[in-house]
Image (cartoon, grey):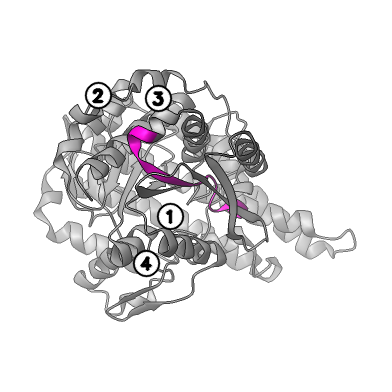
Amino acid sequence: MLPHMMSINFDALLDAIPDYQEFLTVDEMDASSKRLAEQYPDSVELFEMGRTRDDHPLYCLKIGSGSKNALLFGCPHPNEPIGAMMLEYLSRTLAEDDDLRSQLDYTWYIVKSWDADGTKLNEKWFKGPFTLYNYARNFFRPAGHQQVDWTFPIDHKNLHFHNPIPETQAMMDLIDRIQPTFIYSLHNAGFGGVYWYITDEIKSVYEAMGQAAARQGIPLSLGEPEAPYCITFAPAIYKMLGIEQHYDYLEQYGIAEPEKDIKCGTSSADYSYGRHGSFTLVTELPYFFDPRIADLSPGDITRREAMEKNLGFADEIDTFVCEILDHTKAYLNPDNPFKLALEAFTDVKNTHEATRKMISENPDFAKTATNAEIFDNLLISKFYKLLMLGLLFRAHETELSALPDSAEEEPRQTLASAAEQAKERLRELSAELEEKINYEVIPIKKLIAIQLESGLIVADYLQQNGA
């Protein structure tokens, strides 16, 4: 706990989090925001900040009238609703608690579900059961060029992206209007432990952030970082990423024209820092975890060997996905969101090539891997490939359900066969992971508590230190 935050009763705030058993749908979140604005008209305003590509209204809550602006948004990736639930709780708490608003001294701008369209495509797993198979079977995450938090404009070397999607444009307009001091981008991983991204080093908060996770009994993620070019500030705390780092990584390891591999723009964190000096925090949390993610004891293979096994399995699944898509492409709608996502997620040949070159040259990868790094490379990586199999099944399921009764038998049979192959591989890999991973489903309340405490720690630091 930070000394100047002792006046905030964290125990009371965390204890009051409801014991949520499921995630809210977009329509449920919208209805809740409308009720809040009606109940607290003196402190809460609800406005429409824009519309989605499917013409759904994007709602933003404005709460309080503090000296600095804070922008918090959930579902920047639509398969990540933990942050939306945290905002559901925080928005009501801020509306009800005049003293808390005064202590924190922010004007709060809260967007519960930024990628509302994509969130709706995940809602079939929001009510459970929370198993690896059900999550993957009903999972959706868009291609990079359709992600709301990765289509901000960027000019970096030979990379030029200026095609923000409507949801991104709405957030750009809001950021430029309110010029927030603090941005909380509420992401979560599917599996692993807790980790954070921050704009700049602020060493004085690291212990408190770690305690926020420890208080809930959730381990830190101490395996491989999300990207090999992540800069580590402290265990499980990394420097914020923009698309420039990915470009430079590809360039460093021999990819001649990285711009040809990058189909998206940069992030809200990169955009807002460059224009307004905004500080962004990301708290990444898992739905599922296994204690091995925090096991730093030495394993029985090198880090390079573990990474090579990871890349080999990734290539195997990518090949399976691409062969099926190639066979059925004549019967897939060009705008099928699952197909577009898969095409983007399998277009990684140069990234894998750069990674293989990097692990062959970097002496850090010749060292014995920790058990956390082995677990990350050999099992968690397979979990994320499981999600691609879910997308592959849904790509063909969607087309089958759209076929008219009068459709010819050939497309129906081709699509049905592809769907069955994808589902069978999905079931096989799910069964393997259920056997090899001793995972627990983390209560939603615990995850909200970690995100809430981490966010308030950083928000208060920025308020107290004149950021």
Q: CA distance from mark 4 to mark 3?
A: 32 Å
Give the residue drawn at x 20%, y 52%: 200
Give the residue drawn at x 40%, y 25%: 438
- Quarter of the image where one finds residue 123: top right
- Looking at the rendered image, the quarter that the N terminus falls into is top left
Check disc 2 and give the amino acid type. Met
- Left or right, 124 with reference to 256: right
- The residue singled out by tag 2 in the image is 6
**SS of the residue at dot 1?**
helix
- The residue singled out by tag 3 in the image is 438
Q: Are marks 1 and 4 in contact (CB under 8 Å)?
A: no
Pick whichever of labels 2 and 4 is earlier in the sequence: 2
* For residue 467, above or below residue 355: above
Residue 89 is situated, as x and y percent measured from the top left of the image, at: 50, 31
Region rendered in magenta: 102-118
Check disc 1 and give the amino acid type. Glu
Pick whichever of labels 2 and 1 is earlier in the sequence: 2
Residue 16 is situated, as x and y percent measured from the top left of the image, at: 46, 20
View extreme (front): residue? 42
Q: Which mark is residue 29?
A: none
